[in-house]
Amino acid sequence: MTLTASIARRARIDAFKAARRRATDWLLSRQNADGSLGNAADGFFFYRAPWTFALVGETGAASAVCGWFRRNLLMPDGRLDGPFRVVNDAWAYRDSALIVGAQMLGQYDLSYGLMPELLRWQDPASGAFANDRLPDGSMGDDQSIPYAAGPGFAALATGDLATARRVAGFLRRIWDAQSDLDPATGLPARFFYDWSRARQAPTTQFRDEDAFWYVVDNQADRNQRWTIGGIAAGFLCRLYLAEPRPEYLDLAGRYQAFSMAATPAQFKYGPVCKSGWGSSLLYEITGEPAYEAWTYRMGDWFVTHQDPAGFWPPIGTGGGAEASNAPLSTLIHNALEFTMHVDTIIAGLTSRPIPE
């Protein structure tokens, strides 16, 4: 590497750090005296706050959020519920993100204490987790890659390798069930990423207007769940670090390859955000230049799309007034997740020395 290239890479990392700081400051400015963020009545939307604040060293803010959850959401039976939990989508996934952050902070009633309820949502047949809670309190039939990987991270955080292995088994099972493969690459051309609990098979029949929730057509220029490759690869890398079995790393590479092979149009949409999760960890583990280059590209994407105030508006949803008038809860939700991703990117890129 030339000196000029080395200086340029360091400058890019400095830009990523500055973006992380701007986002952190903006989030702190939206924290209320009781520990909540924004308008808590909007629902359980800042579930990732303990994880994000712990990563960036704001442990006071993180602990304050945990205190608010403890006082307002934690039920005597160890579940998170009540009037502030106003939405039923991503039920177990939301719990899992809080578990990871709480474990990082030593808030064990919100990490170990929430695991029994989380594990109740795991499908014993597939290893996946139910996506949503239905109005009657039961579990929906849909189970998808992101909402399985999230609880997988929680299982790793709390030392539950058996559950994490079952998540990895699901990621292998749904990958192997894909039939629409690109003959040139062997990668799925369309990835049906939702799994039916009742049928124990991918969901391939759905209304066209619901396609976002079921399939990623890897070369189509439209808002899609590009998240599936990066979050699966990220989880499998973390599992590999806990239990270095080659098949975990191989599968992580396949999911990340699917993400990186997608149309460049994916960078027009917010769900590309998780792609840097997988590439940064794969670079940390393997040192492969392709993962390094992709991770820098993802870091640049976060910097480019960040508002000067520190938050990220919705990306690829129409722009203009639609983005600038987004609800505060959406902006907080985005900033909490994107700050976490930027931190992971910085960690991956700095885990190996940049040649002088």
Image (cartoon, helix red, strand yellow):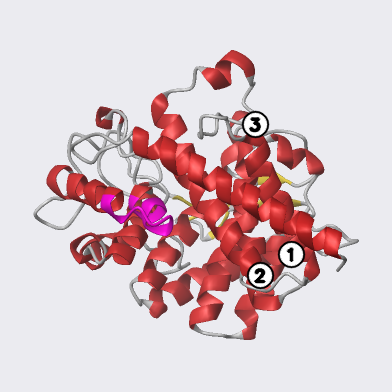
Residue at the spot 30% in from the left edge and 65% down from the top edge: 103
On the rendered structure, is 353 left or right of 153?
Answer: right
Image quadrant for the C terminus?
bottom right
Spatial CA distance of label 2 from label 1 is 7 Å
Other residues around mark 3 within 10 Å, as few (<14) / some (14–19) / many (≥20): few
Q: Which residues are magenta?
A: 50-60
Q: Nearer the viewer, residue 332 or 133?
A: 332
Disc number at residue 282?
2
Residue at the spot 61% in from the left edge and 29% down from the top edge: 209
What amino acid type is highlighted by mark number 3?
Asp
Residue at the spot 51% in from the left edge and 84% down from the top edge: 243
Q: Nearer the viewer, residue 231 or 56?
A: 56
What amino acid type is highlighted by mark number 2?
Leu
Q: Which residue is mark 1?
A: 291
Q: Is residue 292 visible?
A: yes
Q: Which residue is mark 3?
A: 208
Image quadrant for the N terminus?
bottom right
Q: Is residue 204 visible?
A: no
Indicate the position of residue 18 as horizontal and vertical percent values: 57, 46
What amino acid type is highlighted by mark number 1?
Tyr
